[in-house]
Amino acid sequence: MEPASGLPSCTVYKGAAARQKLREMSVPIELLIEAAQQGFVERMNAELPFDPVTAPGTDAWRYPVRVLRKALMELGWRIDNPRNLPLAISDEKKINVTVSSGDEFTGLEGVRQPRSKNPKGVLMEEAIARNTRQYDLFPGSLPIAVQKFDQTVKHKTWVFLIYITDEEIRAELSLPSSMDETDHVNRWAERILIPVSLPDAEVKGEPNFDEGPDIRRL
């Protein structure tokens, strides 16, 4: 799915602007850091060859979903799982948040935008239609499968995108705007970059959120 005509170019938030944007969304930046770090820990805790070979990747996604949704629910959000898409929903802010693994470009500025590691389903396609206002502007042009789930996803959907290796964690909270022909999210209208240190590096100080320009439109 391509973005609707006239969709703004990608806006990248970092530093103080990232903190401000997250405050506006009522998403604590410390919670995002904690969720990503928990994914790193559980990925490292997988015991191969005894665990399934998919355990490290699954746990690196599953535990951030748990940490994020549990904490947001305590802050007044609600949770739902339409067609197994795990959402945290703020009806007050009119936003959804879900979690996905990203590729090696996650959390980095540059010409190449990140891509979801795994293909997504029709609910993400519907979410992107909401995000880009295609439901409002071009309802008849949407695929029949997407039209079938009209109103299943009512708010804009942000993706907490995480990339984890043995040496680093990178993350961002971003607003998807298109999927490619293999159903991977490949474009984003807004990206909030979240610097995340390794858990055992926390004693060295918190990540510096004030380095570099605050907002960049690509």
Image (spheres, grey):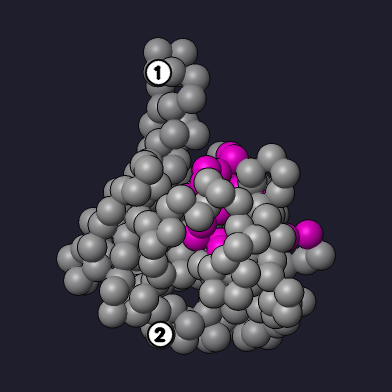
Query: Mark 1: which secondary structure?
Result: loop
Q: In this view, does 98 lie above or below 167?
A: below
- Residue named by callout 2: 24
Q: Residue 23: in sight, yes or no?
A: yes
Amino acid at dot 1? Asp
Taking the spot 78% from the left edge, 59% from the top edge, the residue there is 112
**Residue 87 versus residue 6 in the image, above or below:** above
Residue at position x 40%, y 18% from top?
51
Counting from the top left corner in percent of width and height, residue 184 is at: 64, 46
Q: Where is residue 90 in the image (x, y as percent from the top left)?
A: 30, 71
Residue corresponding to mark 1 = 51
Seen at 69% across and 76% down, the residue is 7
Instruction: Give yes or no for residue 145 being in the magenta stretch.
Output: no
Of labels 2 and 1, earlier in sequence is 2
Q: Is 15 placed above or below 141 here?
A: below
Residue 41 in view of the camera? no
Point out the stretch of residues depicted in magenta: 112-129
Q: Quadrant of the N terminus?
A: bottom right
